[in-house]
Amino acid sequence: MTVTPQGLYCVPGGFHVDPWRPVDRALITHAHGDHARGGSRHYLGARAGKGLLHRRLGADATIDTLDYGERLSINGVTISFHPAGHVLGSAQLRVEHGGETWVVSGDYKRAPDPTCAPFEVVPCHTFITEATFGLPIFRWDATEQVAEDILRWWDANRALGRAAVLFCYALGKAQRLLAELAKRTDRTVFVHGALHALVDVYRDAGVHMLPTRLVSEVEKGTSFAGALVLAPPSASGSTWMRRFGDYETGFASGWMRVRGNRRRRGFDRGFVLSDHADWPDLLRTVKDTQAERVLVTHGYTEPLAHYLREQGVDAAPLATPFEGEAED
Amino acid sequence: MRRLADLYEALDQTTSTNAKVEALARYFQEAPPEDAAWALYFLTGQKLKRLIPTKLLVGWTQELTGIPGWLFEEVYASVGDLAEVIALLLDARERPARTEELPLSAWLEQRLLPLRQLDAAGQRAQVLSWWHAMPRRELFLLNKMLTGELRVGVSSTLVVRAVAQVAGLPAPSVAHRLMGTWTPSPTFFRQLVSQDVSDGDSSRPYPFYLASPLEQPPGDLGDRAEWLVEWKWDGIRGQLIRREGSVHLWSRGEELITERFPEIADASAALPEGTVLDGEVLAYADGTPLPFALLQRRIGRQKLTPKVLAEAPAAFIAYDVLELGGEDLRSQPLRERRAKLEALLKDVPRLPVSPVVQAATWEDLATARGEARARNVEGFMLKRLESPYLTGRKRGDWWKWKIDPFTVDAVLLYAHPGHGRRSSLYTDYTFAVWNGTELQPVTKAYSGLTDAEIGRLDRWIRAHTREKYGPVRSVEPEQVFELHFEGIQSSPRHKSGVALRFPRIARWRTDKKPRDADTLDSLKELLHASG
């Protein structure tokens, strides 16, 4: 496999993986905007993610799907999708040709998530890992603990008659929060328009979540006192916020592990909850795959590759145009 | 320690002032005095001198975590706070959630302060044993104390308010008791919150009474004869204390500056026991104040050489006498205090009484105001002759009538959102003036617009954004504002080469076009006028 101006390319197979420019044949790991981009002629992804891919790429995009583990031969290259545990329908792509196996992880996490199938270890020769949180300061607490903290924060604001506005990535994090909270309460949550349709896709896929109401459908003048509101981070500081009157803000993201990230953006609370692997899980996963070679992409690629090399792993960064702080 | 961690967390997790005071009050209510005293020490911005070299802390962290030096650097660059980096790196998942609890005072007195007596190996053994057993929050606080960086980010006004609330005392009494130097001991904290007012520390100043800016025409103040008028000197407001054979000079910032001004301290030896004066430290020669810049240069010097002392000799211009013969005079009318002051300082060199401005009517006074800049003063102080010496900024009896500010017409270039409840509004602005054909940013300004104007400008900014850099937006250079400021200094730290003093927005000049804005050259001409 090689990198072309369009993205990661499998030469014998004649297909791209998560290309950032339109190509003839695109294999997609998951529906986030930095992985699934429009304009290609044919798409192929995991069946569980079909609804989300259509939302991202348009209803008339040509999208074929495979079940997790189902094999397909493309020009003599055997490919299959395997759960990545990142968001609904997210997949690692296994590529086998001439006795050589590659796995493109896409984004992944090892922590349990009620909205998607759990990460599957796929042994390979070459493993392409993400590195969004590829620094040793990033370690996640148990999800139950974080969900409990969020519920307590909501309750505390409720007791004071305040709204609690929780910012989170619209695809994946929002639904995971709604599903985690559904284990603890049955109260309705208000959601921003950017999340709303995606929540519906998850419901259609059978994910159990708290009931939701669209903020913009609420009658003008309605009080949001005591409500929990989920919104994308881009809504922070927008005029949309003014309707909530007295409120506190929180942000659920792996970036909240660092206090300065929260303080800089002016959130009252930061909840450390990520859909990406933390440092220990990145290292564990590299080991689990038994890969002889590791390519590192997205995020802290240099530090992770450098560290792996020091541990005796043949590792190198793999350049993509999506560098810098990824959404989470 | 756990209680302090709870407090730190509560303060860190809110942007609301009331919630902060509440959290502080709860802490002072519950904490034993020996712990409360230490918490107060940190909350009022005092710091422990570094206990352990940072290099050692970094080395031990690397040793414990197996993180190589280059990776530690990488992490430090992305976090920017050493105490936090160490806490995050040491935070392995199996860390205990709750462990042995030791009170804050014990931590400091039995553990942290004695570190200074240990050699590196002894320090290492101690620190590692704590790191091993502490939950993350406490670990972070411990590291902050070890690195001498523990700042809690609340203003001392809020701390005073919370202590006053708990003690059932007026805030000014608490502020008074917190002035000066004190050691964080249980005795100190008990005295701080006690109802007994006979306590005393001979070096302790009174809280300052501050004048409010005059916004109405002075004629509205009534009969001119009821008012004492003085020049408003541009120096360091201070309090001079002569008690128990010693002299203490305090700045309004609660800094003890006696040693910076030996000539004032020497002159004060002539004062009788139990005297407290309110006044202004000025560079002063031959009966005339010298420009503030001279005084500033002197403050900046590490060593007071005879040359420095000769270049910028200092004096204490006295405004008021607050204590005489050990008696607190603050409740007496200014008329009486002033008479006592004049009698007291007759013929005391270096301690002149601030002269009274002789102008029979408010109109005459307005004329005299024209001389202010030439005299190196900022305007007038107007004090009601019947007024007691109050605490803080209380409107009504003391006014400052400043000379008209400088003005500049500048173009709005960048906007930044406000804080807390105003975070959905662009309320902080950067303004530019012309430098040739380019707009050169010269100052930021926050205040001066009405809420309605802020709303209107916010909508305009959103509709005319050129680029976004994080929270900052650059906007089309179209809007012109009249800014007021009190002074201008050359500044190598600013790209424009100048720094404005107290800039604020006077008016939104919708009648002006960007080309009507002022130039950097015209601003620099004011450098001379500003002294």
Image (spheres, helix red, strand yellow):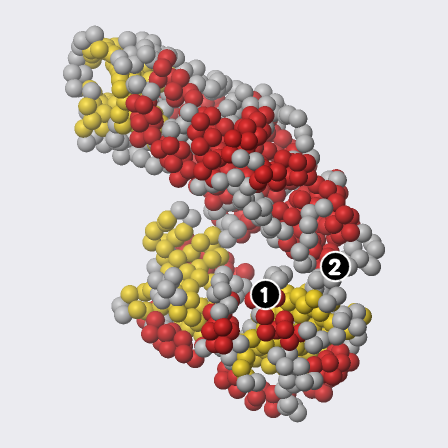
Q: Residue at x 61, y 53 (%)?
A: B155
Amino acid identity at mark 2: Asp
Q: Is residue B210 above or below residue B384?
A: above
Front in this rendered view, residue A253 or B478 = A253
- Find residue B242 and report its image quarter: bottom right
Q: Which residue is mark 2?
A: B201
Q: Residue at x 47, y 39 (%)?
A: B54
Q: Is residue B426 visible?
A: yes
Q: Which SS class for mark 2?
A: loop
Quarter placement of the N terminus of chain A: top left
Q: Which residue is mark 1?
A: B259
**x, y percentage for residue A174?**
48, 29
Front in this rendered view, residue A10 or B153 = B153
Q: A183 left or right of B268? A: left
Q: How many marks?
A: 2
- Find residue A73 and report its image quarter: top left
Quarter placement of the C terminus of chain A: top left
Residue at mark 1 to residue at mark 2: CA–CA distance: 19 Å
Q: B136 left or right of B476? A: right
